[in-house]
Amino acid sequence: MTYKILHRKWLLRKWMWTLMPLELAGLVPLLVLFGIAQPDLYRTKLWEVGHAYGFNSNPKMILYAYANYEPYPKVPFVWTRTLTDFNVAISVITLFLLLTKLVAFIMKFWFPLLAAGINVAMVALYTVSVYGQMGPDHADPRYPSSIAWYIAKSCDYARPFSAYKSCQLAKGTFAVTVYMLALYLANLGIALYVLWPNAGDKVDGDEDDDGRGSSDGSSPVDYAKEGREWEMRDWHAKGGPASPRVGVVPYTPRTQAFHTLDRKLPLRQQYG
């Protein structure tokens, strides 16, 4: 049993082709939602709404720290500009990765080992994004929050502050991010399944992704063999030589050498 680390056959090709359009369907709205959220479309607004109800810390804590000459407070990750920029970055990376994966999969360069490593990285990135969007916020001990209020609660709380649509955008962004995380977990599962030893490792010889041998007529050697076969078929169909340069009986340079040693000139005797 020979285990191939790099060149392994994709056992679930149909699932791979199914996941790609699903990724595109989630990536397009994600690019739009992350893009319009930058730099601060609704982040600070939702922070203020949550503090008004006692759901999270006060967004003015930074101003209070400056006014009282106190150290810069640690802002919860959910309310930082870093999270917003991070989300935009992973959406662009996802777009580039999807295009690269499509081309590499068609060209048969998307190896399972490479796919597993990349999917692990993407799962980690989207996990950070999901964690950042859902909280927690423990900056103020008086108003601790384990999950951001706009995810755990209804957006009706934002209506008095004219932030209802902003709350819906935040909820939708979180939902699409979870959707993309689930897709990359599925991709990772497929890659690990293909990397696991299977019955295909017992088959000797190189096989392509369709389960056929290398002699499928696609290599230069196969084309050369096919050309020689058609040449012989054409010669038999015509029943004789196609030109004076070909004898009735095909001969090789070695045969010509034997005729020369015998002081015979087969072409002159035949066509003379």
Image (cartoon, rainbow, N blue to C red):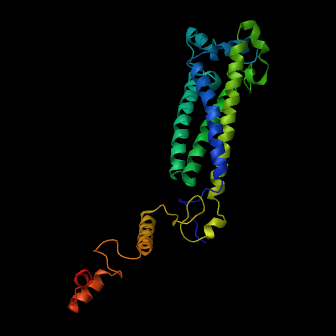
Q: Quadrant of the C terminus?
A: bottom left
**229 or 266: nearer the eye?**
266
Residue 236: in sight, yes or no? yes
Tell whether 58 sits left or right of 233.
Answer: right
Q: Is residue 133 above or below residue 52?
A: below
Q: Position of residue 256 (x, y in %)?
A: 26, 84
**115 or 139: nearer the eye?**
115
Q: Specify the quadrant of the image occupied by residue 133.
A: top right
At 22% from the left edge and 91% from the top edge, which residue is drawn? 261
At 71% from the left edge and 29% from the top edge, which residue is drawn? 175
Q: Position of residue 39 (x, y in %)?
A: 55, 18
Name the residue at the front extreme.
272
Tell whether 268 sits left or right of 141.
Answer: left
Q: How many marks?
A: 0
Residue 137: in sight, yes or no? no
Q: Is residue 207 above or below residue 99?
A: below
Name the residue at the left extreme.
263
Q: Quadrant of the N terminus?
A: bottom right
Q: Position of residue 30 (x, y in %)?
A: 62, 28
**261 or 33: nearer the eye?**
261
At 63% from the left edge and 46% from the top edge, which residue is drawn? 17
Q: Position of residue 269 (x, y in %)?
A: 24, 85
At 61% from the left edge and 15% from the top edge, which residue is drawn? 41
Tell whether 86 sits left or right of 226.
Answer: right
Q: Specify the quadrant of the image occupied by residue 219.
A: bottom left
